[in-house]
Amino acid sequence: DQQVKQNSPSLSVQEGRISILNCDYTNSMFDYFLWYKKYPAEGPTFLISISSIKDKNEDGRFTVFLNKSAKHLSLHIVPSQPGDSAVYFCAARSNFGNEKLTFGTGTRLTIIP
Amino acid sequence: DSGVTQTPKHLITATGQRVTLRCSPRSGDLSVYWYQQSLDQGLQFLIQYYNGEERAKGNILERFSAQQFPDLHSELNLSSLELGDSALYFCASSPQLTGQYGYTFGSGTRLTVV
């Protein structure tokens, strides 16, 4: 049962344009959502997060949007840079006793120079 | 360097064997999490330890076990290995009991079962 879904395995974006990565979830008990970035041969690195009481969180070039009614979140990167090429994982945490993070399958973002 | 150290980085072993993966959490972190990433799969949660005690369990096989020692390092033991156990195994740590503010991941151990 995949509670966190990233339906696009890959995405290619021109340098300087906006990259939009999407994530859907099914568990309404999730209260915190996070994005991680992963380069080859490295572990995932925390990028940005958002609480379920907010609908937007911004950090420099990265903005995460949360639509609770649609159970959907997205990560916007603008402008996209070559160093943003990586695999991006969406993750969610339940507020009901279970403290683990549930991860999506990831989206491989390629920025084209 | 994330501060979370995993050893070894690579491991090749035969089916039926047993291996131990080791993780040293970031200094000051009390929670340790183990995740498995198989080909084209997301990160599957295996188990969490907090200050030496098992805290949460995911889809961890009975052939797998883990522990966290008094110095807070953790070991993941995989036994009776099968081809399907080939994967990247990540350890992560966090300061608190919960993963609310995100984990810090190690660089992983790539296990190949032949």
Image: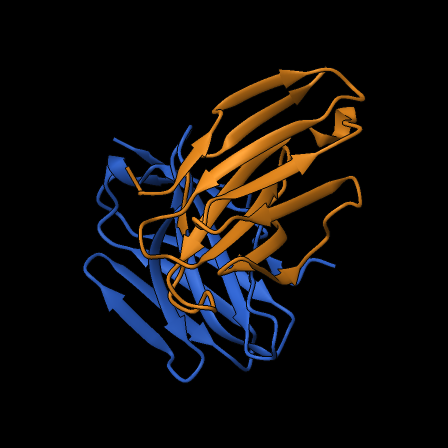
Chain colours: A blue, B orange
Where A48 sits versus A112, above or below? below
Where A53 sits versus A100, above or below? below
Q: Residue at x 39, y 55 (%)?
A: A20
Percent x, y of residue A57: 30, 71
Where A105 sits versus A24, above or below? above
Percent x, y of residue B81: 76, 27
Q: Residue at x 61, y 25 (%)?
A: B111
Is residue A82 shown left or right of residue B53? left
Q: Answer with the quarter of the image where residue B29 lies.
A: bottom left
Q: Residue at x 47, y 24 (%)?
A: B9
- In the rendered image, the residue lying farthest to the bottom is A53
Percent x, y of residue B38: 64, 36
Q: Residue at x 78, y 39 (%)?
A: B63
Where A95 sits versus B52, above or below? below
Is residue B57 shown left or right of residue A14? right
Please tell me which residue lies in front, B48 or A38: B48
Percent x, y of residue A61: 22, 56
Please tell me which residue lies in front, A46 or B58: B58
The C terminus of chain B lies in quadrant: top right
